[in-house]
Image: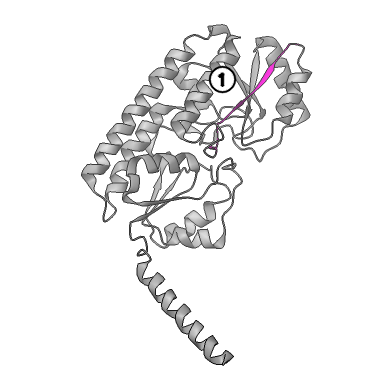
Amino acid sequence: MRTIRFLAAAATLGLAALALTACAPDADDRPLVVVSTNILGDVVGEIVGDQAQVVTLMKPNADPHSFEISAQEAATLRGADLIVSNGLGLEEGLQQHLDAAAATDVPLFVAGDAIEVLDYSVGDAAGMPDSHFWTDPARMVDVVDALEPALAAIGGIDESALATSAAGYRSELTALDDDMADAFASIPESRRALVTNHHVFGYLAERFDFTIVGAVIPGGTTLAAPSASDLSDLVDAIEQTGVPAVFAESSSPDRLVQALAAEADIHVDVIELFTESLTDADGGAPDYLTMMRVNTERITSGLTR
């Protein structure tokens, strides 16, 4: 009797499973765009909307110089209709996977190829390309200009809808650029100087007429480490320029910046910025436009107090 009841129950469960399978939605058949960093992932998502699946490999609050991916994520790269990356040496832990996917003829869009690239001018990275172009919204317009046709070339993308969303996002980037220029104009020329964890503001400095006093890590990557002489030279520069604040990135520990501020013979505030990674929805910088506006307000406030 127990056997009969068991078989009846199994049959009932089997029918239920079939019913659930019949009701389940089909697999997502939209084109797949895989993006390396979360800043570029946000931009791609704003442009393509829900015409494509946009998979961003870099998690919120991660460091683009050091994040790595799983074997499953590497396989996702190889199955993409388009891969979007920063290039310029930023994705140090990801480059081998990007190269492997490109070797299998997966289309690859490299944002660094779409802009006028600056080189680092100081530190171990001097003469090498600076990958932090997103700190200049005008260069992000150049990225959008080049990204739009790359997305339009994917089968199944509505080019008209894509053009409309791309135009709208360009307008938002232009408005951001104007607002940043207006805010930074309030900073006295004598205080338009930046000290950060590492050299991340070269493009912002060129665009908005700042001087880079230095960085705690004198190079383009957070994986480097400062020497005692680096810190001593930077303390001297801070004391000579009298900058009222130094800036620490949210994706990197700020202990070195705090120690640096303590070494200077003047009061120096340490202010956190979102420069290399977006946050989750509640973290203060959930998208690129918000990140840049928050940073603008904090830089302006820090250098005018």
Which is nearer the eye, 258 or 8? 8
Q: Which residues are magenta?
A: 266-279
Q: Residue at x 55, y 33 (%)?
A: 127
Judged from this view, the residue extending furthest toward the front is 1
Residue 51 vs 299, above or below: the answer is below
- Look at the image and tell me whether residue 304 can be seen: yes
Across and down, in percent, residue 144 comes to 34, 37
Q: Which amino acid does the dot numbered 1 rest on?
A: Arg
Which is nearer the eye, 20 or 228? 20
When asked about the image quadrant of residue 139, the answer is top left
Across and down, in percent, residue 93 comes to 58, 50
Residue 212 vs 265, above or below: the answer is below
Q: Residue at x 65, y 17 (%)?
A: 245
Across and down, in percent, residue 283 comes to 56, 35
**Main SS type for the magenta part?**
loop
Across and down, in percent, residue 21 comes to 39, 71
Q: Residue at x 39, y 34 (%)?
A: 115
Q: Residue at x 73, y 20 (%)?
A: 261
- Look at the image and tell me whether residue 118 can be seen: no
Q: Secondary structure at mark 1?
A: helix
When asked about the image quadrant of residue 1, the answer is bottom right
Residue 4 vs 65, above or below: the answer is below
Quadrant for the C terminus in the image: top right
Judged from this view, the residue extending furthest toward the left is 160
